Amino acid sequence: MRKRKKEKNGTKDKTGIKNRENTKDKNKNEASAIQKHEDAALKTAMRYFAEELLPYFGIKGEVEGYAPTETVHLELKRFLQDFNLIMSDGSWKHFEFQSTNDGMEDLRRFRSYEAVMSQHYKVPITTYVLYSGNIRKPMTELQEGENTYRIVPIIMRNKNADRLIEDLEQKVEAGETLSRNDLVPLSLCLLMGGKMLPADRVKSAFGITQKVKGVSAQDVAKLEAVLYVMADKFLKQEEMERIKEGIGMMKLSQVLFDMGREEGRSEGRSEGRNEGINEGIDQVNRLYRRLVDEKKYEDLERSTRDKEYQRSLFKKYSIL
C-alpha cells in the first residue's frame, strides 16, 4: 500500500510540473500574440498618419516609407520615438505624442532625437508634437548658445471632443451613412478639448466605429488602429487594459493582418521593396537591442561601421 501511494504521489508531482510548464508556455504564447497584435496596430496607424492625417494637419509632401523609431546613442541610451515618416524629398517627419508639458526638458529630448537620427541616417528631420487636450501653451522653441531649436506643435484644444462624439453618435443611431472623412477627426479625440475623460472618449469612439455604416471594414480597422495607438500613448495602464478587453483586440488584429496581406498582393514588387527596407530596419534594431542587453558595446560600435561584421552578427544571433 505504501509503495503504491508513493508512486501515486510521484505521478502527481510529475503531472503538477507538466501543468506548470504548460501554463508557462501558454502565457508565453499569449504574450507573443498580444505583441503581434500591437505591432499590427502600430504599423497600420503609421500608414493612416501618412495617408489621412498629414493632409488633415496641412503637412505637405508625399510619404515614401517608414523610418526606424529606435536607435542606440553612443552613450548607450535608447532613444525611442513615436513615428518617423520618410518623405519623397528624402527628409523625415518625426511625430511625438505628449500628454505632459515639461517645457525645456521635452525640447532637449526632441532635439537629441533629431541630432542622433540625422547624424546616423544623414537626413534632415522636422519634429511635430501632438499635444493632448489638457495642454494649453507648450514651449515650442529652445534658445541655447547661438542655436535655436524649434518643433512644430499640433494643438487641437479648440476642437471639442464632446461635441464631435455626440454628433457622430446621433448620426449613427439615426442610421445615417458616414464617410471616411467624417471619421478622421475621431481618431484625434484625445488631442481635443472637452469635459469627457480620456478613457470615456476612447470607449465612445470605439462604440461609434463598431456601429458606423457607409465606411469599409478596412477603413474602420485603420481608424481603430490609430485610436488604439493614441490610447496606448495617453491612457493609464489600468485604463488601457479595460480598453483592450472592450474592443476585442484579437479581432482587430486579424482584420489588420488580412488587410496587410491583401495590400501586399495588390502592390506587388514596389510594396515588396518597401517591406524589405522596413524588415531590414527591424533587423538592425533587434541586433542593437541584443548587443545592448548583453553589454557587448564594442560589437555594437563596430557593427555601425563594418557592414560585413554586422552581417556576421545577424547570422550569429539568427536574426533573419
Image (tube, helix red, strand yellow):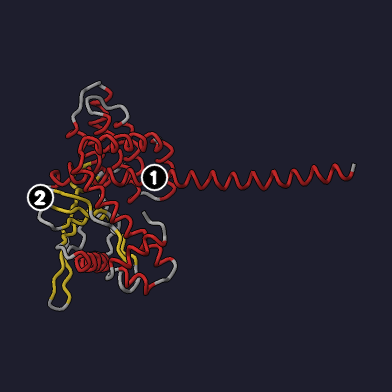
Callout 1: SS = helix
Q: Quadrant of the N terminus?
A: top right
Left or right relative to 67: residue 35: right
Left or right relative to 26: residue 156: left
Name the residue located 13 percent from the left edge and 57 percent from the top edge: 90
Type of amino acid under label 2? Gly
Question: Which of the 4 image quadrants contains residue 81?
Answer: bottom left
Callout 2: SS = loop
Left or right relative to 289: residue 54: left
Which residue in the protein does label 2 denote? 61
The answer to whether residue 301 is seen in the rendering is yes
Residue at the extreme bottom of the image, as rendered = 145
Name the residue located 36 percent from the left edge and 60 percent from the top edge: 314
- The picture places residue 41, in percent across and down from the top left corner, at 32, 43
Q: How many badges with numbers are in the image?
A: 2
The answer to whether residue 103 is seen in the rendering is no
Q: Looking at the picture, tell me which residue is in the foreground, 157 or 218.
A: 218
Residue at the extreme top of the image, as rendered = 175
Type of amino acid under label 1? Lys
Q: Quadrant of the C terminus?
A: bottom left
Q: Looking at the picture, tell me which residue is in the foreground, 305 or 256.
A: 305
Left or right relative to 112: residue 248: right
Residue at the extreme right of the image, as rendered = 1
Q: Nearer the viewer, mark 2 or mark 1?
A: 1
Q: Residues within 10 Å of mark 2 (few under 14, many from 20)?
A: some
Which residue in the protein does label 1 denote? 36
- The picture places residue 141, in percent across and down from the top left corner, at 16, 66
Q: Residues within 10 Å of mark 1 (few under 14, many from 20)?
A: some
Question: Which of the 4 image quadrants contains residue 149?
Answer: bottom left
- The picture places residue 221, in percent across and down from the top left corner, at 29, 35
| Marks 2/1: CA–CA distance | 30 Å
Tell me which numbered mark, 2 or 1, is placed earlier along the sequence: 1
